[in-house]
Image (cartoon, rainbow, N blue to C red):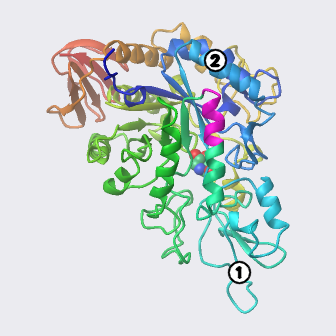
């Protein structure tokens, strides 16, 4: 047999992001779990996705819903156990679906045994060296070591009883690890191998542009910035030392042929972004430009061009997403109501026509909108840390409706779901949409089917002349057109394959996209 010249699977695939708390509850406690995912794998196979990304399911006090990990090599009982994970891996593989997990190398939970030991040990001890402890400023060290703020709001430093301070770029319960300490990478390697040895197909790596901290921890030039955001020159992130960490991670992952690493890289500059996916670093990095673009022809085209350019210099794979568990649902972002839904459906056809790897967030295929939750229901630490000025990310994390006419819509046997489900979601439930050929679910299923069958979607994306307000591009024989304007536009020549709304005559209505074969 000759060498295997096929492109790696992760260069052209559709990932489905499962937010395990909200996908399906098998245990009846109102919170989704691993067996709930396993029970719905046929739904995912029918949807036509190639791989899953599970948000963190490791042992955690859940201060940030699993991104505060207390034991990175065990499953939190809320989600099940290791046997449940093994069942999910096996059942996914039986259906030809790959399974990736989410790892959190930048920080641990404050309940992690290392941090508990650090708190019980003296300043300067080996135990404290695993985290970033510093003396404070000012005569009695009562001021934080620098002016850094937490991404979730408030200071990034908390003082401990002996007077030292520890760094947490996120919640107080998420102390940052000290990646200058070789023990940290050694432990992370153990974690990588632990899951890869169990058969998982790779990882999404949280805050992949974090981890390395600048020598001397200099002040931030500006602290008056929007929560959950930062610029490329922010000293808290994107430091040059991070690349050696990714090379060390890649050396481990390369021991497992076919395994993939996907980095969460909030870096805007194309050259700096590309550095993260050099051949010996991450396989893929999320590009968030399309997700940040308005429903506007110019912005959509710019986002696509820039995302392609971002990976071109390193011959990397472009990645695309419209939603995830940290951002507002696209239906709402694009204007809510009927127009928001129509635009989100149109953008689904843009997304699934693009070359490279696509991420679909659970519920996106149902056209779920963002939910306006009552204050008392909010759980995201951002709500408390912002002093109740930012509502946080719970509105995109509401459990999925599966069936029936009243909450919890088949998600759970317990009506008291971890976030309340809107009472008017019956028409959005999977059961209702599955039998309706015009539903958003049917649109996703059909688009994914065409994408799969026409693996011959050409490699290269080529822009075609577009009427005002529209974007038109070709990939091989597929032509995708989206109308973001307020007037109908002429449809390009070609046989009609699929449209996100009704096609009348030779025109494409506003807020609509179509796929043609030409
Ligand atoms: C990014 C994750 O996507 C987000 O949900 C989390 O709060 C932060 N990283 C901190 O781990």
| Mark 2, residue position | 90
Q: Is residue 517 left or right of residue 3?
A: left
Rendering quarter of residue 412:
top right
Residue farthest toward the bottom in the current orientation of the protein: 139
Distance, label 1 to label 2, CA atoms, is: 49 Å
Do callouts 1 and 2 mark residues in contact (Cβ within 8 Å)? Answer: no
Residue 171 is labelled as: none
Q: Main secondary structure of the magenta part?
A: helix
Residue 347 x %, y %: 38, 31
Between residue 515 and residue 179, name the one nearer to us: 179
Closest to the observer, 27 or 112? 112
Q: Is residue 383 left or right of residue 80?
A: left
Picture residue at 39% right of the left edge, 28% below the top = 8
How many labels sit on residues? 2
Q: At 73% from the left edge and 28% from the top edge, which residue is drawn?
A: 32
- On the question of residue 26 being in view, the answer is yes
Q: From the viewer's perspective, is residue 394 above or below residue 428? A: below
- Taking the spot 53% from the left edge, 19% from the top edge, the residue there is 97
Would residue 104 be seen by someone viewing this image from the given angle?
A: no
The residue to which callout 1 is attached is: 135
Label 1 crowding class (10 Å Cα cut-off): few <14, some 14-19, many 20+? some
**Dot placed on the residue nearer the N-terminal end, 1 or 2:** 2
In the picture, which quadrant includes the C terminus? top left
Between label 1 and label 2, give the one nearer the viewer: 2
What's drawn in magenta, residue-wise? Answer: 191-199
Quadrant (top left/top right/bottom left/bottom right) for the N terminus: top left
**Picture quadrant of residue 174:** bottom right
């Amino acid at each position: 047999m000759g060498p295997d010249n096929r492109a790696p699977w992760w260069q052209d695939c559709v990932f489905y992001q499962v937010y395990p708390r909200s996908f399906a509850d098998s245990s009846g406690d109102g919170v989704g779990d691993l067996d709930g995912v396993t029970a719905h794998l046929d739904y995912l196979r029918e949807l036509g996705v190639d791989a899953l990304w599970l948000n963190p399911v490791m042992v955690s006090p859940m201060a940030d819903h699993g991104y505060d990990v207390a034991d990175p090599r065990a499953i939190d009982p809320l989600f099940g156990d290791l046997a449940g994970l093994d069942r999910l891996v096996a059942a996914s593989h039986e259906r030809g679906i790959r399974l990736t997990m989410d790892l959190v190398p930048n920080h641990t939970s404050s309940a992690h045994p290392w941090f508990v030991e650090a708190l019980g040990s003296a300043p300067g001890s080996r135990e404290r060296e695993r985290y970033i402890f510093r003396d404070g400023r000012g005569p009695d060290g009562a001021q934080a070591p620098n002016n850094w703020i937490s991404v979730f709001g408030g200071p990034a430093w908390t003082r401990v009883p002996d007077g030292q301070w520890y760094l947490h770029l996120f919640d107080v319960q998420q102390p940052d690890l000290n990646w200058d300490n070789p023990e940290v990478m050694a432990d992370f390697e153990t974690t990588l191998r632990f899951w890869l040895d169990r058969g998982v197909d790779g990882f999404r790596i949280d805050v992949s542009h974090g981890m390395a901290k600048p020598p001397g921890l200099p002040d931030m030039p500006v602290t008056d910035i929007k929560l959950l955001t930062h610029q490329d020159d922010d000293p808290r992130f994107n430091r040059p030392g991070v690349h050696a960490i990714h090379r060390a991670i890649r050396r481990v992952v390369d021991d497992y042929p076919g395994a993939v690493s996907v980095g969460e890289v909030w870096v805007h500059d194309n050259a700096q972004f590309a550095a993260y996916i050099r051949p010996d670093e991450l396989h893929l990095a999320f590009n968030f430009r399309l997700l940040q673009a308005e429903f506007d022809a110019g912005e959509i085209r710019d986002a696509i061009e820039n995302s392609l350019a971002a990976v071109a210099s390193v011959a990397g794979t472009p990645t695309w997403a419209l939603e995830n568990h940290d951002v507002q649902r696209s239906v709402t972002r694009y204007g809510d109501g009927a127009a928001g839904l129509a635009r989100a459906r149109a953008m689904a056809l843009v997304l699934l026509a693009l070359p490279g790897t696509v991420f679909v967030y659970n519920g996106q295929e149902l056209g779920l909108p963002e939910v306006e939750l009552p204050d008392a229901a909010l759980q995201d630490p951002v709500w408390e840390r912002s002093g109740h000025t930012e509502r946080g990310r719970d509105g995109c994390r509401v459990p999925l409706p599966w069936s029936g006419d009243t909450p919890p819509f088949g998600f759970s046997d317990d009506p008291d779901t971890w976030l309340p489900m809107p009472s008017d979601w019956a028409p959005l439930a999977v059961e209702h949409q599955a039998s309706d050929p015009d539903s958003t679910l049917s649109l996703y299923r059909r688009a994914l089917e065409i994408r799969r069958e026409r693996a011959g979607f050409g490699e290269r994306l080529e822009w075609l002349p577009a009427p005002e307000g529209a974007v038109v591009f070709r990939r091989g024989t597929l032509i995708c057109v989206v109308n973001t304007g307020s007037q109908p536009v002429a449809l390009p020549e070609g046989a009609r394959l699929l449209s996100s709304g009704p096609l009348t005559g030779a025109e494409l209505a506003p807020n609509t996209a179509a796929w043609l074969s030409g």
